[in-house]
Amino acid sequence: MAKNDLQGSLDLLVLKTLSQRTKLHGYGIVVHIQRASDELLRVEEGSIYPALHRMEQSGWIASEWGMTETNRKAKYYRLTRAGQKQLHAAEESFEQLVKGVRSILRYA
């Protein structure tokens, strides 16, 4: 799988998470992905923050500073309207990727 496909998968996971959970900080997104996938998917914190920054620069997510449950300062992210559109496109693209992989697996 090409690097862009992997990056696209992380984008898809983050955007989907933020569509389901109104506001989360980076670590909260990591935990949600891990739990929602029954511990099958793990996103390293070293990968999530550059991805969040890139998605914020693209206008797909917005952020604001707030306090965590443990009274620590954290950046909270939410999905924007542009992010909702990107999520829809990413879901369609992922479905096509899965369809292609399934076709190859059946053929082989």
Image (cartoon, grey):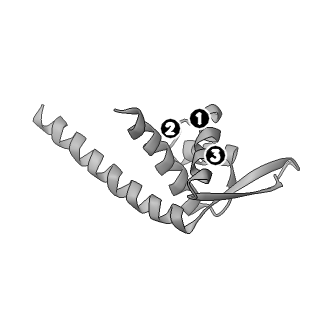
The residue positioned 58% from the left and 46% from the top of the image is 54
Q: Work out whether mark 3 precedes mark 2 in sequence or the reverse, and give the earlier one.
A: 2
Quick check: 100 left or right of 93?
left
Percent from the top left, x then y, of residue 22? 64, 64
**Label 2 or label 1, whichever comes before in sequence order:** 2
Q: Residue flagged by tag 3: what amino acid is it?
A: His
Q: From this viewpoint, which residue is outermost toward the bottom?
A: 81
Q: How many marks?
A: 3
From the viewer's perspective, is residue 108 above or below residue 71?
above
The dot on residue 47 is: 1
Q: Quadrant of the C terminus?
A: top left
- Cβ–Cβ below 8 Å for labels 1 and 3? no
Disc 3 to disc 2: CB gap under 8 Å: no
Q: Residue at the spot x=41%, y=38% of the render?
A: 4
The quarter of the image holding the N terminus is top left
How far apart are the alpha carbons under marks 1 and 3? 10 Å
The answer to which quarter of the image holds residue 102 is: top left
**Dot 3: element:** helix
How packed is label 1: few (under 14 Cα within 10 Å), some, or many (20 or more)?
few
Q: Mark 2 = which residue?
A: 41
Q: Say what secondary structure mark 2 lies in.
A: loop
Circle 1 SS class: helix
In this view, the residue in front, 61 or 27, is 61
Residue type at mark 2 is Leu
Residue 96 rendering spot, x and y as whole percentages: 27, 51
The residue under the point 55% across, 50% down is 14
Q: How packed is label 2: few (under 14 Cα within 10 Å), some, or many (20 or more)?
A: some
Residue 53 badge = 3
